[in-house]
Image (cartoon, helix red, strand yellow):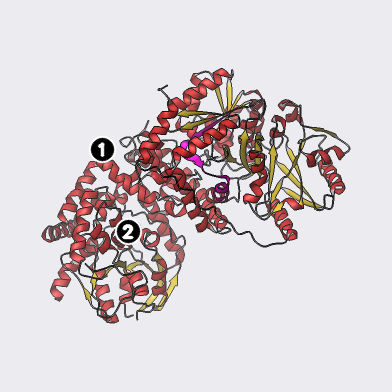
Amino acid sequence: MSSDPRAQVLQSIRRALGAGVSRGAPPTAFALIAPDTSSASLGEMFCSELRELAGTATIIRDKLACASAIETYVRARGINSMAVQSSPLALEIGLALRGFDVAPAKGRSAAELERVGCCLIDGLALLADTGSVLTVATSYEDRLLPYLPPTCVVVSEMARLHASLSNVALACIDEAARAGERGEGVIITGPSRSADIEKTLVLGAHGPAALAVFIIATPT
Amino acid sequence: MIETSAPSVRYRQGERVALFLPCYCDALFPQIGRSVVKLFERLGVPLEYPMEQTCCGQPAFNAGLWSEAGALARRFADVFSSFPWIVVPSGSCGAMARVFYGALEGEVEATQVGARVYDLATFLVEKLGLDDVGASFAGTVTYHDGCHARRELHATNAALTLLRAVRGLEYVELPRMDECCGFGGLFAVKYPELSVSMGQAKCEHIAHTGATVVTSGDASCLMHVEGLVRKTQPHASLRFMHLAEILASDG
Amino acid sequence: MAKPFDRKAVARGFAHPTSSSALLATLERTAETSDAARRQVPWQALRSAAHAIKAYSIAHLDQLLEQFEAQFTARGGTVLWAPTVADAVAHVIDICHRHGATSVVKGKSMLSEEMDLNEHLSAATIDPVETDLGEFIVQLAGQRPSHIIGPALHLSRQEIGVLFERKLGIPYSDDPEVLMCAARERLRQRYLTAAVGITGVNFAIAETGTIVVVENEGNGGLSSSVPSVHIALMGIEKVIPRLDDLQVFLRLLARAGTGQKLTTYTHYFLGAEPGKTTYCILVDANRTTLLADPKTRESLYCVRCGACLNVCPVYRRAGGWAYGGAYSGPIGATITPALVGTEQASELPFASSLCGACQDTCPVAIDLAHQLVYLRHKVVEETRAGNPSTTRAIRFWAKAMQSLPAYRRGIRWLRRAARLGRTIGWYPGLLGAWAKQRALPPVPDQSFKEFWERRT
């Protein structure tokens, strides 16, 4: 390899840009005016967007009812085992579930997680206009959760509902970034899909074919 | 040196207007030039035709021969320098002057004169402030949008406004009007399979409308599509007329 | 390598009308879906904002890359620089050897196509496993991808069914769901046994040293998360200044390319967690050539959405392989001359009717059609290629246009040739190329100039 590839590339760029190094600031950040909607209608919007993507969304009264609803959902799909993301809300709900093998993902191998029927992850933010969920994973095991098991269950709260993707919504990822957290944030918009064969839509290409979001209205 | 007027400025009675007629129209479609002359007579706007004009230089420009295109741009500027308004019945040549003279390195005068060039429809609607030019034409007419007219000159609305005001004319919208007909100048003879395939798609869309007349602001597009129709359906009664011919028509 | 847009190859391609018309119909539908999705957001305002951010990013490329490097490194990642594709390949192979990788799982990366990475990995006895469904299919078929977003769109479901039956040993089926399940099954174990995962990069944020990758299938997530080593291959032009800027692009990207509001997965890599090693390889590979010419610089704004391919009447008919390289469609025609050399790519800028649909549809408002005309000029200036006989004919015509008498002689000749041709049924030169499938117009008695003279 040539002398110093880094210097080579940077020199090449500087030569290409020519004289006069500008030090201006980037353009003013684009401000998308979010629609002035009540949280109730945002909730409706979120649910309908996710349904259009073949996901399911339910707004549920409180944590207890949420746990019960998740139990029903998972049982109906014939799932016996669940791996839980190590974030407070997911652990709280996960460990309240009864009737199947629920355990935190922490300490389990990829091969083990591959055999689990379902994951439970924390939706740190919800985006109403696209039916999207944001989550942050800061360990190896948590990073695998949204992709390996064939069903993905998300638990979140109405207070975390945003009208649209915005800097406020991205703040949860940004905070983790700035706090020096390592790992991966991901915005999930519906179940895994592909249209690579004749542009025909199929679900569950590699990631989960089923995505279910449970939104707690009053967490206390 | 005549200053180029601001976009919102309109034509004032008495100002000189020059007709710029594409070279291939001079050769093969003189009726388009005659129609513009007749139309301007009807509207009471004096029109001049500087005999010295030859070609805007677009074939050279599109072939990558930019110094030859520059020479023709300079010549154009010379020929038309004394006219505050220049009208051309072509979106393609209009775009060459208005938009692409500016891409030629250092052609300041050509760029300035080019900015005074307007395609026919835009001149009538935006500079003369007309939608009804007193035309009558009986027939079911569909309109094809030339790519330069649409995307470089944004002349579509003006053309449709004028067509809709023609007495007796029944306008039918062409499906996928914004799709290229496949002419593209050099492209038509360099990649004939692609060019003809695109033209055939255009023919299918035209057949779909049931129109008896096809019009456009660009004779080059019409020449290409009509060429296909005449070759494959020699007995078809479909007519191809430039927008100027329809607007000059008295019924 | 075959010369892109070799005219004989294009003519031969038309001998297979079914695959061409299937692609055309598919892309017409995709363009319509995309149009509907665009109308849901303030499209033009977003486009302008995106264009401005990219203009800034490209104009400050060196500073932003240095900032990104510092931040990415602070997060425990390693940045490597590659002036050429060969350098990038060497980095990847070196990393694989150091981590004892005998196979790698790959998310979709156009840059890896540019690098011919799979060939080089195989030669180094490292098994490259394509995980994106479309890439998996073309890899099985031994073909190159034909579309930036849908690599296997040129294949019918029946053809894929036959391919899977032969190569995967499953019973024949042409049901896309069955085929996808077969691919998913086959790839599951590959994720678990690969030591290295490779993805591309859609955006790199300088401010925070984070990498953003978007995808629909989840294979990008699996490729980057399962193996303990993640290599992110990045063209240097992918860097943007701040997190604030990301949402503009996220709003445009999926809507432009597929008509989705957002891709299923938008990964935002925060740096290597314990036990993980991440590399980001910054690749130049002639992007600085595009950068050096102000007239081609905007092509670096490209976000690889595929919208220009979807609307291009030439791409829809000729398909991706006609472009002869990793990138096809209008963006391919624009950047390939810089990536592989003007001589080799000399036909590309001419294989266009310059309709401008690409420029209109581009979510970052790149002046694609204007660049294509400019590249024609470059080709003519720099090479002796670009169809010399046509160039000579136009040069001759341009000369004639310089004086009125010469012009009038030329017009008289044209009218005579057209009139004679109609009588004898044959036309010389370019008129002949026209007349094979199109009639020439009847020649009127007088030219306009003759009419005008008689009038005055």
Q: Which residues are magenta?
A: C230-248
Residue most toward the left?
Answer: C405
Placement of C96 over or under A43, stated as above or below: above
Q: CA distance from mark 2 to mark 1?
A: 27 Å
- Residue B127 sits in quarter: bottom left
- Residue A37 sits in quarter: bottom right
| Residue B99 image label | 2
For mark 2, give the secondary structure.
helix
Left or right: where B113 falls relative to C154? left
**Residue drawn at point x = 42 percent, y = 55 percent:** B201
Is residue A90 among what the camera can see? Answer: yes
**Residue drawn at point x = 13 percent, y = 74 percent:** C454
> Mark 1 sits on what residue?
C383
**Where's the N terminus of chain B, which quadrant?**
bottom left
Q: Nearer the viewer, mark 2 or mark 1?
A: 2
Depth check: C320 or C113 in front? C113
**Residue drawn at point x = 24 percent, y = 75 percent:** B37
Q: Amino acid at mark 2?
A: Val
Q: Position of residue A70 (x, y in %)?
A: 82, 44
Q: Amino acid at mark 1?
A: Thr
